[in-house]
Image: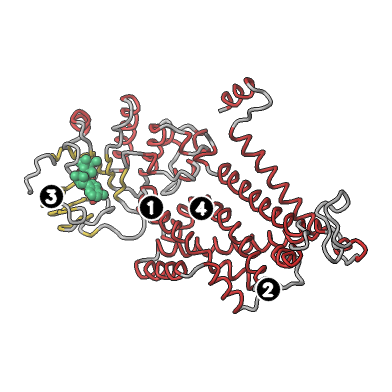
Amino acid sequence: MMKVIETTTIKTPYLKLNRRQQTIISIILSASFLLMIILGGIFSSNEKIQTYLEMRNLSPSLQHIFGTDWLGRDMFVRTLKGLTLSLGVGMLASASSVIIAVVLGMAAATMGRKVDTFISWLVDLFLSVPHLVALILIAFALGGGIRGVVLGVTLTHWPSLTRVIRAEVMQLRSSEFVEISRQFGKSSWWIATRHILPHLVPQFFVGLVLLFPHAVLHEAAITFLGFGLSPHQPAIGIILSESMRYLSTGMWWLAFFPGLSLLVMVRAFDILGENLCTLMDPYRGHE
Amino acid sequence: MLLKGENIGFRYGKGPWVLKERDITVESGEIVGIMGPSGCGKTTLGRILAGYEKPHEGRVILNEAPLPKKGYNPVQLVFQHPEKAVNGRWHMKDTLNEGWEPNDEVLEALGIEKAWLKRWPNELSGGELQRFCVARALGLQTRFLVADEMTTMLDAITQAQIWHVVLDVAKKQDIGIIVVSHEKHLINRLCDRVIDLSPVKVS
Ligand SMILES: Nc1ncnc2c1ncn2[C@@H]1O[C@H](COP(=O)(O)OP(=O)(O)O)[C@@H](O)[C@H]1O
Ligand SMILES: [Mg+2]
């Protein structure tokens, strides 16, 4: 392996990096981007998002790169705070969906027929209801707020991943190394945690990566529609829905930058996740 | 100790009977070959004897009793493809020690190098991996070993080395061996007795 690295780096010393180096660089870039958002969101002072009526409705400039809104608040700082909140909500919601999916997928594949039938039925049930409708109902029933949004996103997003994981566990369960482990007298629990779970690590992260954009965008969507986070919270969805009222007056920057930043952040997370998977998978990592 | 398959019948799903009214006995310390062309049911019989598969007819008996359902199975099986028989996400050391902790003597005899223990399975060749699988199966509680085409894909020297060790350990621990192979030479060289599965009379 060392040889390969050497030859590729010697041939084109600066431009072309090998796959592993590319992976690591992508990880570092996207991770630091996300970290900057989080740090920026947490540490930027609240001073800039106070009302400054004399600085109302400014279009983007060097001082306010995302412009200011109708109350003179700096849109860049508002966006940062909104992104941080979205990131947190998205992470929480996608992580809990993935955990549910792993637990149920494992249970369906290892705990016998009845459990399997029941879980498959649950999956079908949840899949048959459109996401956004179920999401709004759940968030509404829980009275909105962060708890409502996180639970809503969690409860609507576990089923498809559960299916994938169940199939994967089924296949692993009949693999020879698991059969051998059984002949050594290992318990089902031991096999599930030691043999099967490590193989689900990529699924776990792929799941996170796939669900995160959904979680973030759905959060923004239901907040935008007024069923999610409360207007006092600095959420992107809130910013977008408020900005809608001002769009017709030509203040394009109010919605444009926050919306674009949201998409960019989601993409950065995507890149991070994808590359982490590549790096961690021993089958691919050693190529 | 006696491993006995009595009147064994087996089919996959609703397919044709792969085995029918098959009897087989192996004693401790004995080396018995199971021979026959590809697809005649050698692997299936091996899996049944090692308790991987339940026969639809007949039964497998170890020392007057059915195979134990729990705990270490005294009838161990070594598969043909070692890369499928080890967990790709485990270091070789963990794989090696899953059933018991083989002593250095066995490892050395099998030519397992200390440095290999820290590697992942995909960093070893098939022959190197198979040595681990063999060592893993030769635990002190193992009474019978089913070797299903265990060395078929290995070169002659590795093949000889592995069999040399297996026979040696088997003698010391009084293990009975069932050699499943389509190679006549190997079977004739190793075995005290041969069971030929080739003529399939059942329609
Ligand atoms: N999992 C399976 N499902 C269905 N048929 C199988 C399966 N495994 C083996 N068979 C069939 O059973 C027969 C015997 O297979 P096998 O015991 O593997 O033969 P051998 O090891 O002698 O080559 C073959 O005809 C094969 O196609
Ligand atoms: Mg076979």
Amino acid on which disc 2 is placed: Gly
Q: Which label sits in the foreground, 2 or 1?
A: 2
Q: Which label sits in the foreground, 2 or 3?
A: 2
Question: Relative to residue A213, is residue B75 drawn left or right?
Answer: left
Pinpoint residue A253: horizontal percent, then vertical percent. Answer: 77, 56
Q: Which label sits in the foreground, 4 or 3?
A: 4
Amino acid on which disc 1 is placed: Gln
Callouts 2 and 1 in the same chain: yes
Q: Is residue B30 visible?
A: no
**What distance separates the C-alpha of mark 2 from that of mark 3?**
69 Å
Q: Which residue is mark 4?
A: A203
Pinpoint residue B132: horizontal percent, then vertical percent. Answer: 41, 38
The quarter of the rendering in which ligand 1 is drawn is top left
- Chain at numbered mark 4: A
- Chain at numbered mark 3: B
Callouts 1 and 4 in the same chain: yes
Q: Which residue is mark 1?
A: A171
